[in-house]
Image (cartoon, grey):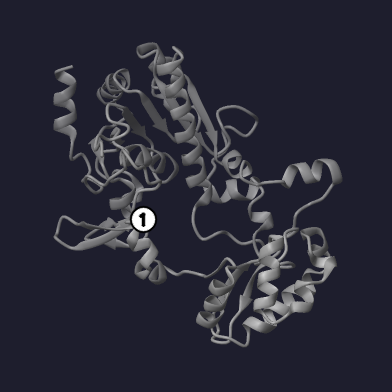
Amino acid sequence: MNQKHALAGVRVLELGGLIAGPYATSLFAQFGADVIKVEAPGEGDPLRRWRKLHDGTSLWWYSISRNKRSIALDLKSEEGRRVVRALAARADIVVENFRPGALEGWGLGWEELSALNPGLIMVRISGYGQTGPYRDRPGFAAIAEAMGGLRYVTGDPGRAPVRTGVSLGDSLAALYGVIGALVALHHRNVNGGRGQVVDVALYEAVFAVMESLIPEFSLGGFIRERSGGSLPGIAPSNTYPCRDGSYVVIAGNSDGIYKRLMHATGRPDLADDPALAHNEGRVKQIDVIDGAIAAWTSQRSLDEVLDAMRRADVPAGKIYSAADIHGDAQYRSRGMIEPVTLPDGARLDIPGVVPTLSETPGATRWIGPRLGQHNDEVLEEMRHE
């Protein structure tokens, strides 16, 4: 196996903080890119102190900042801006997630940096994008999820919309930013193109995964509503109660799987009913079908339900907590729970690298660095290039 990292030789400069930009650069770093993270002196990225801390540092930080080099620079000072310009001049990609116009105010905008480095690719992640009437508004993932349509369809009918429990808008924007950067990198390196801007708006990243939301409204005026654990228009697929107080997700939403599911739950009448042979017929009688499945699951423990579904070859699963994930054999067998050692010797498990590549897999080479840990190293490299 070739152990060379897939993105070896790619240089990435990270400007900004919190989630979207840093998550994007973490993906580059996991596959071997040299990511230099610029942080403000003194406090650094606020993410260093978010959520659960160990010895004053966020446990999240060690994961999202793995394989990055940290330098502390004051972007409001001319010296700090001089160093950023020098780093951008030798970079392939700059990732920033400031509010539009902030970098321009410091003389570090696209026009300035691309003049120094015509091949530069600049990923700009913001709430509303670099253009449009909302560009100057502050935008976080929660607002993007609301504007992008996700919040409206999330939750139970007749109740207030709910959030997903993670900052999904940030993560989606980061993924689109990475996709855009790799597309631009291919265009530059293979097609002889120049550098370019990858403009990612948080709300657009959410909107882009909203499936048939707009086509259905455009032609028929249909507005998708909150539906709890079910999948509207695709039947049956829902969350069902078990006897022991737990819940199971069952997806019997193809014709063959549906028949196996209903036979497994003791309802051959529903399995063999010609009116229910295809999805469109099942959608019309989903209350009857869901009621039959729930009546069966509620008389059995979660393990009994899962065992029966496995024997019937029906997709089903329990709803995993962090404890379930941490102890699961499938996660463990694929290296998705990765042990690392903290500076004080404590052991910490972090998420493994996704996706899995057969020839050039990603890897954790080191965990999130101390603030400014690589100042001397980076500045010395600059002097010799």
Q: Would residue 279 be visible to someone looking at this image? A: yes
**Circle 1 sits in a helix, a strand or a loop, which is it?**
loop
Provide the residue designation for mark 1. Answer: 50
Can you say whether 52 is above or below 302 in the image? above
Image quadrant where one finds the C terminus? top left
Dividing the picture into quarters, in which one does residue 205 lie? Answer: top right
- For image coordinates 30% across by 45% down, the residue present is 65
Image quadrant where one finds the N terminus? top left
- For image coordinates 32% across by 33% down, the residue present is 6
Can you say whether 304 is above or below 352 in the image? below
Dividing the picture into quarters, in which one does residue 340 lie? Answer: bottom left
Dividing the picture into quarters, in which one does residue 265 lie? Answer: bottom right
Can you say whether 199 is above or below 237 in the image? above
**In the image, 194: left or right of 215?**
left
- For image coordinates 65% across by 67% down, the residue present is 229
Amino acid carrying label 1: it is Trp
Query: In the depicted view, which residue is nearer to us: 366 or 4?
Result: 4
Q: Would residue 195 be visible to someone looking at this image? A: no
